[in-house]
Structures are given as structure tokens and as C-alpha cells.
Amino acid sequence: MSTYRTQSETEADGDILNADCPSRTVLRHVTDRWAPMIITVLSQENTVRFTQLKDFIGGISGKVLTETLRSMERDGLIHREVIPTIPPRVNYSLTNLGHSVVEPIQALRHWAEKHVTIIEQHREKYDAQTVK
């Protein structure tokens, strides 16, 4: 187990710095490429159908959306409800656990949107120096 721990952590808490700690996979799932966007949509729309999610999130394929939703459902972040209509309708919503991650995701989103210009400038400067 790693030795770095904050004072507020207890033995029951995870340790993200420990290679064997399952909290690493939790962080990876919550911060993957698409999960923050799905969480953002569901936090604003409450219940959304698959096609609506796909329309809201530009650039995601149906296959990747399906895989990400399954992973998030497995982690307990979203609820999947099948409505027995013809054809069947599937609705997605955040669980209580999913709602608990909305605020941190929103903070990261706002940070990224606020700093995108300066980060792009740093990238251009870096790329110009390393291409030589």
C-alpha cells in the first residue's frame, strides 16, 4: 500500500496511488472519454433515450455509447429502464451514486472550458519547439 494518505482518509477509503486498489478503475470509468458527457446530459435532462444521448453528444458512435452505458450501469452510476412498447423504448437516468459525481464532473468541465484557449496556446508553443 502506498504511504501517501491525507488526514481525512480512513482505512476503509480507497488509495488511488496503490496499484492494487479498485478505486483506480472507478476513476478510470468516471473520467473516460465519454462518461463525463453522459453524466452532464443526464444531470440536465433527468431521463434520456439512447438516440437522444447520441444526438446530444457529438462524435460518439452507437457502439461506444452502448459500451459506455453498460460500464456505467455496471458501476451503479446510471439506471437503464426498458419500456415494453413496440419497438421497446430504453430510458437512462442517473442513480443517486451518479448524481453524487455531477458536481465534480461539472467542476472539471468548467475548468476545461475556461482554460481551453490557454492550453491550446501551450500546445502550439510546445509543438513548434519540438518539431524542429
Image: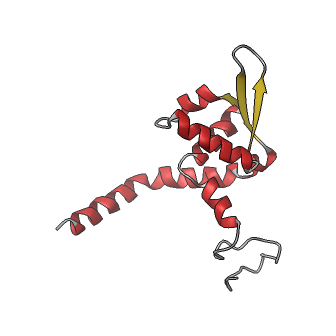
Q: Which residue is outermost to the top?
A: 86
Q: In this image, 57 relative to 46: left or right?
A: left
Q: In this image, 41 relative to 78: left or right?
A: left
Q: Quadrant of residue 126?
A: bottom left
Looking at the rendering, in which quadrant would you find the N terminus?
bottom right
Residue 84 location (% of width, % of height)? 78, 19
Residue 42 location (% of width, % of height)? 67, 37
Looking at the rendering, in which quadrant would you find the C terminus?
bottom left
Residue 112 against residue 92 in the figure, above or below:
below
Q: In this image, 131 relative to 104: left or right?
A: left
For the residue pair 86 and 78, the one nearer the viewer reads as: 86
At 24% from the left edge and 68% from the top edge, which residue is drawn? 130
At 61% from the left edge and 59% from the top edge, which residue is drawn? 28
Q: In this image, 21 relative to 55: left or right?
A: right
Residue 82 location (% of width, % of height)? 76, 27
Number of numbered labels in the structure image: 0
Residue 93 against residue 5 in the figure, above or below:
above
At 78% from the left edge and 76% from the top edge, which residue is drawn? 8
> Which color scheme does this rendered protein use?
secondary structure
Q: Quadrant of residue 63?
A: top right
At 68% from the left edge and 73% from the top edge, which residue is drawn? 20
Residue 13 against residue 103 in the figure, above or below:
below
Residue 58 location (% of width, % of height)? 48, 35
Q: Which residue is outermost to the bottom?
A: 3
